[in-house]
Image: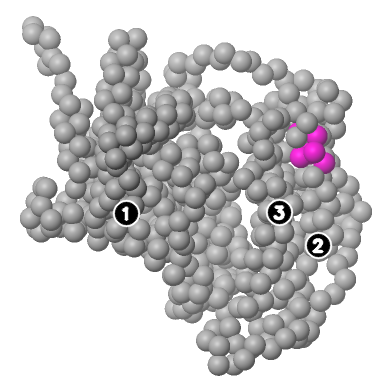
Amino acid sequence: MIHPFAWLTWLIAVTIALSATRNPLYLILIGQALAIVNAVSTAQSRQPLTFWKPNTLVVMLVVTSALFNALLVRYGNTVLVRLPAWLPLLGGPITLEALVYGALNGLALAYIFIAFSIVQRMLPISTLIGIIPRAFYPLAIVTAIAITFVPTTLRQAQHIREAQAIRGHQLRRLRDWLPILMPLLIGGLERAFQLAESLASRGFASQPTQSTQQHRSTQLTISVALTGLLSGWMLRLIWAYDTLGSILMFSSAILLFGKLWMLGKHAPHTRYRQFTWNNADTAVVLCASVTIAVLLLPWPAIERATLGYYPYPLVSQPSFDLGIGFAIVGLIWPAVTQYIKS
Amino acid sequence: MIQRFLSATIYTLSSVLGIFAFLAPFFGIMLQNDNAQASAPWLMSAIVGLCFISLLVEVQGTGINAKHVALLGVLVAINSILRFAEVAFPGPGGFTPIFLLIILSGYVFGAQIGFLMGALTLFVSALITGGVGPWLPYQMISAAWVGLSAPLIKPLAHLLGGANSRGELLAIMLFGAVWGFAYGAIMNLWFWPYATGASTHYWQPGVGPIETLQRYAAFYLLTSFVWDSFNAAGNVVLLACFGAPVLRALRRFRKRLDFTYQPSGSTV
């Protein structure tokens, strides 16, 4: 199994790639990479990818986005059809360029959704909870409780529904849900108090996670970080002190993350499943990092201008840079790793 | 005293930064610097994220105990099931039942529980419905603001008749209607500056605040108003149907939540 942080790095790379380009050739290449990773991961996971099949999702989003853009945008030289002018907001020419631009946006959105779905499917919920930073330990506990209670609450809802049906209760109007919602809520709250007693009896929160002094220090650090962030942003936006503003904002962010790290060090932490980092994870991270670096940084041999594609005013043939193409192909590495491991 | 002052400072600074970040596209004329204009959408995301982290640290640091954890866990589970039902059987337009419990929990248990209820409902329901995506942090912070601001209804509710009166329910319904539209308007802002196109409905660097506002208004009216109307109407209808009994139940449990046992002989 690929390490969760390797998956997250891959996800960041895919998201950056999809945000950086609207060139249809690169988008198709990203789509193919996602399809390969999806195909290999399908063999390893029994969960469905999303409520819809990936192809259905792509078609649905591309068609919706293309139609929406075509109906709202009047630019473009290639007029396909003219809607009657008396139609409010919609009347006017429908252009090929608007259709293409809308379709490309829809394609990028569908791929983002599929990439997140792949990662969510490959990482169990317990692992996703484990990724929550240790500084947010109480919130991770709440999340774990909520996820554990979801099936119990569903069963409870079913029991209440059946009990009410035996009494002759029928769901005709919205108000008829009240005899189901209220016992569900009150029963849930009663269980919450039983759970709280169990937690307290096992020593949970018997002592505050931070002393008053520590809490005050945390508050002070956050206040300073937020003030720095605000000041830095104002310096950049209003007075155009780019460097000074950026340094101030970056330092504030470091201060905030440093405090989070310090807070996390005090949080109790138990791991039932240890993920080991191996060479395959390093390869996934390296490939994703190369993709990010090629797409975001200026390189002498790379034509970054090819990333942008603007179909207005006349649809044209998109250009292609081999270096960017290779960088995008690196996104299939999770599939290669999983294939080798299996 | 100092803790309260620092807490108020964090809430104020986070809110100012968060609101300013979301409204950044409207301040075009203030942005004299081209570089700052171009990077504004990216910065907006980073700043909203940092504000959210700051608020989470502050909220969880102020005396969250076993009862709060258990209460939140169970309420979030119930609300996540409502969202699951909404995803499986979509209602009309932007109708969603999740705001019923977020608003009422925030109103009864306070801003801290309301904030966490909003943020965690969206997080947990995204995990169980497969809705994790780049939009999730924005959904979390917007829903958290709904819960955080719920106690603000109290003065109006008091004016209209106080606890358990029709006036109180009316004030909460009004609040639900306003957030039905506001939630959609805020959620649009996370992608609107990125969705640049050859249209008069999209954001472009260098456009003045009035024109930006006009463009956003056109975009909102065309794409979101009808959708959000269902959300606002849904909130009003759900609060009208279930608001009063849910409020009574939550108030009863609040008394038990506030109860603390002090052994005799222990010093305070």
* Vertical comparison of A195 with A302: above or below: above
Quarter of the image with the N terminus of chain A in it = top right
Q: Residue A173 carries which label?
A: 1
Label 2: few (<14), some or many (≥20) within 10 Å?
A: many
Task: Specify whether residue A110 is in view.
Answer: yes
Of the numbered discs in the image, which one, if any, rests on residue B145? Answer: none
Image point (61%, 65%), residue name: B195
Q: Quick check: B151 left or right of A38? A: left
* Residue ID at (32%, 14%): A198
On whether disc 2 and disc 1 are found on a single subunit, the reply is yes
In magenta segment, residue A37: yes
Q: Mark 2 lies on which chain?
A: A
Label 3 is placed on what type of residue?
Thr
Disc 3 on helix, strand or loop? Answer: helix
Q: Where is residue A219 in the image (x, y as percent from the top left)?
A: 34, 34
Provide the residue designation for mark 2.
A24
Q: B264 or A166, which lies in front?
A: A166
- The tag on residue A56 is 3
Give the magenta part as a residue range.
Answer: A36-41
User: Residue at the spot x=58%, y=41% of the render?
Assistant: B130
Q: Which amino acid does label 2 sit on?
A: Pro
Magenta residues, dominant SS class:
helix
Specify which label sits upstream in the sequence, 2 or 1. Answer: 2
The vertical placement of B184 against A29, above or below, is below
Q: In this view, does B232 lie above or below A193?
A: below
Secondary structure beneath label 1: loop
Q: Where is residue B233 in the image (x, y as percent from the top left)?
A: 34, 62
How many residues crowd around disc 1 within 10 Å: few (fewer than 14), some, or many (20 or more)? few
* Residue A204 located left or right of residue B208: left
Is the residue marked by circle 3 packed among few (<14), some (14-19), or many (20+) residues within 10 Å?
few
